[in-house]
Image (cartoon, helix red, strand yellow):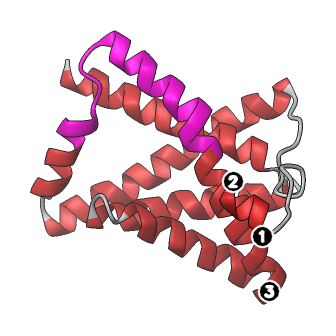
Amino acid sequence: MIFMRRNKANLNALGFKKVSVATIFGMTLLAVMMLFSAATVAWLQNAILGPDPSEEAFTRLVSPRDPAQLLILITFSMVLVGPVEELFFRGYVQKGLEDSLGRVKGWILASILFGLMHGFNIVRAIAPTLVAGLFLGFIWQRLGRNTTAVAIMHGIYDSIALTLSFLAAI
């Protein structure tokens, strides 16, 4: 919101638009594809480099422990995490980089920054999150810079990942 006020931008200028039920369904399918792609990269990293103790500790720390906690985290992901990260990375960063550097360079640089930001939690999260950022940025472009659609996709991605993490711990 600080960025919006500083630059006199409104939510519409940052890509928050109405979406149809068909778009939501499409974002759900794309979120599954994105999760599979990011998980494949993470699996390859672990196959090549071996398990990462810090990743395992972080996963234990943030994984939901009961159904109520899972529901709270899914709600948090859908209402806050997806929209806030996409507002910033697609609506502000990628839009600005694309307007300055061009469509492809802006998309790639925004995706790299997205991956690096997630590396603050776990260094090995950079590559899988870069893949997710490339997905989100590409879809954002293809849908006419629709930040709402990718915010939904991002929230669904996180929700599926949380659910899988919860189910794996049972």
Disc 3 + disc 1, Cβ < 8 Å: no
Q: Quick one: quadrant of the C terminus?
A: top left
**Residue to which mark 3 is pinned:** 100
Helix, strand or loop: magenta stretch? helix
**Is residue 137 visible in the rendered structure shown here?**
no
The label on residue 124 is none
> Is 66 in the magenta?
yes
At mark 3, the secondary structure is helix
The magenta span reads: 59-83
* Lower position in the chain sequence, tag 3 or tag 2: 2
At label 3, which amino acid type do we have? Ser
At label 2, which amino acid type do we have? Met
* Residue under the image location 65 percent in, 52 percent down: 86
**Residue to which mark 2 is pinned:** 1
What crowding class fits label 2: few (fewer than 14 Cα within 10 Å), some (14-19), or many (20 or more)? few
* Lower position in the chain sequence, tag 3 or tag 1: 1
Left or right: residue 100 versus residue 128 is: right
The label on residue 95 is 1
